[in-house]
Image: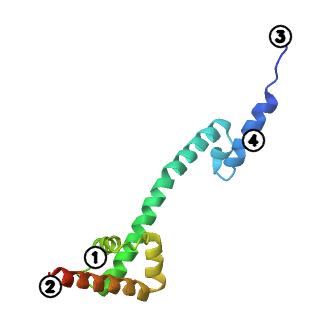
Amino acid sequence: MTRTKRGYAARRRRTKVRSFVSSFRGAHSRLTRTISQQEIRAMDSAHRDRGRQKRNFRRLWITRINAVIREKGVSYSYSTFIHDLYKRQLFLNRKILAQIAISNKNSIYMIYNEILKKLVDWKESAGII
C-alpha cells in the first residue's frame, strides 16, 4: 500500500479554522488545539445567545410600550393594553408598537383612545355602566 501524505488536507482545514479565530487574542488565534476549542466555544455562545437576544429585544419592546402607556393613564397597563388590542383584533406586534411609541407617541395615544372608546361603547351596549 502506498504512503499517504496528509499535509495539504490538514493544513487546509486548519487554515479555514484559523481564519475564523484570526481576531481572537493570544494563543486563542495561534495554537491549533486552543483554536479548535475556542471555535467550539464561540459557536456554542453564538447559538445560545441568538435565543437570548430575541428575549432581550422582546423585553425592551414591552418596557417601551409600557412606559408610554403609563404616561397617559396610571391605571392602564401594558397587559391590559395588549389584551384590549387582541379583543379588538388589532394585531400589531410588539416591535411595531415599540417603534410607534418611540417615534410618534400621538399614534399610540390614538390607538389607546380608540380602544377605550370601543370599550366604553361595548359596556354601554351590554348595560354594565
Task: Kindly indicate whether the residue at mark 4 contacts the one at mark 3 (C-beta within 8 angstroms).
Answer: no
* Image location of residue 54, percent across then percent down: 47, 60
Q: Residues within 10 Å of mark 1 (few under 14, many from 20)?
A: some
Residue picked out by circle 1: 77
What distance separates the C-alpha of mark 1 from that of mark 3?
78 Å
Marks 2 and 1, the one that precedes in the sequence? 1
Which label was assigned to residue 15? 4
Amino acid type of disc 2?
Ile
Q: Looking at the picture, how far across and down is residue 101, in whole percent? A: 43, 81
Spatial CA span between label 3 and label 4 = 29 Å
Amino acid type, label 3: Met
Secondary structure of the residue carrying tag 4 is: helix
Amino acid type of the residue that numbered disc 1 sits on in the rendered structure:
Ser
Q: Residue at x 38, y 76 (%)?
A: 65
Going by the image, does 44 lie left or right of 90? right
Q: Nearer the viewer, residue 25 or 122?
A: 122
**CA separation, marks 2 and 4?**
75 Å
Q: Which mark is residue 129?
A: 2
Q: Earlier in the sequence, mark 1 or mark 4?
A: 4
Residue at the right extreme, as displayed: 2
**From mark 1 to mark 4, how far is it between C-alphas?**
55 Å
* Percent of width and height locating residue 22: 69, 50
Residue drawn at (31%, 87%) of the image: 72
Secondary structure state at the residue bearing disc 1? loop
3 or 4: tag closer to the N-terminus: 3
Q: CA distance from mark 2 to mark 1?
A: 21 Å
